[in-house]
Amino acid sequence: MLSMLRGKKGKKGFTLIELMIVVAIIGILAAIAIPNFLRFQAKSKQSEAKTNLGGIFTAEVSYFGEHNFFGNFAQIAWAPTGTTRYSYTSGDYTGPVAALGGLTSVADNAGFLPAYAFTAPVNRTDNVFLVAAAGQIDNDPTIDEWTMNEVRSLVNLVDDVVN
């Protein structure tokens, strides 16, 4: 028996069972980590909409200060730059807006998500506006939708991260 133990000491390496256990542990960790990573990645893509809607709000407030009405994207000189994941629309509204169909101005989104056909008004005489962003941030058919109004109320109408 002592000779068998001495013989095993000279052998180096792992047994097949030990390797299978390591592969199983790595598989379990990957199954837990990958969905979380995809969710965090989608949430980070939402920051584009939040940042751009905030920039549009600032431009609208500045324009209102000079002209006493809110302008469309051409009037406030705003257009998305770079590669965008979201389509941006703007408009005036009367009351709560449950869908993006009531908006009246669309940004040049470089052909991305031209889902809404709007015509921009020449001037707005009211003191309200609504800007919206809609975009595909993951691989499901749900579109992520955000709105912001004249009091900087940011609303996530459809959260594509949880759907």
Image (cartoon, helix red, strand yellow):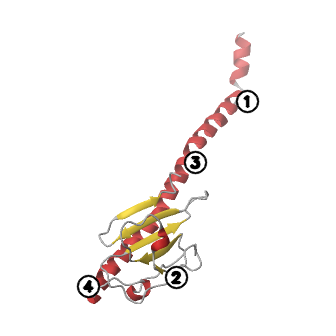
The disc, 4 or 2, on the residue closer to the chain's N-terminal end is 4
Disc number lying in front (4 or 1)? 4
Which quadrant of the figure has residue 53?
Answer: bottom left
Q: Residue at x 49, y 54 (%)?
A: 40
Q: Spatial distance from mark 4 to mark 1, Cα to Cα?
A: 74 Å
**Is 49 situated above or below 121?**
above
On the picture, is 9 further left or further right than 108? Answer: right
Residue 62 x, y percent position in the rendering: 29, 83
Disc number lying in front (3 or 2)? 2
On the picture, is 78 further left or further right than 68? Answer: right
The disc, 1 or 2, on the residue closer to the chain's N-terminal end is 1
Pointer 1: what residue? 16
Disc number lying in front (1 or 2)? 2
Q: Spatial distance from mark 3 to mark 2, Cα to Cα?
A: 35 Å
Kind of residue indicated by mark 2: Asp
Query: Can residue 95 be seen in the rendering of this structure?
Result: yes
Pointer 2: what residue? 108
Pointer 3: what residue? 34
The disc, 3 or 4, on the residue closer to the chain's N-terminal end is 3
The disc, 3 or 2, on the residue closer to the chain's N-terminal end is 3
Q: Spatial distance from mark 3 to mark 4, Cα to Cα?
A: 48 Å
Residue 65 tag number: 4
Disc number lying in front (3 or 4)? 4
On the picture, is 63 further left or further right than 113? Answer: left
On the picture, is 41 further left or further right than 19? Answer: left
Q: Residue at x 70, y 11 (%)?
A: 2
**Is 144 situated above or below 122?**
above
Q: Spatial distance from mark 4 to mark 2, Cα to Cα?
A: 24 Å
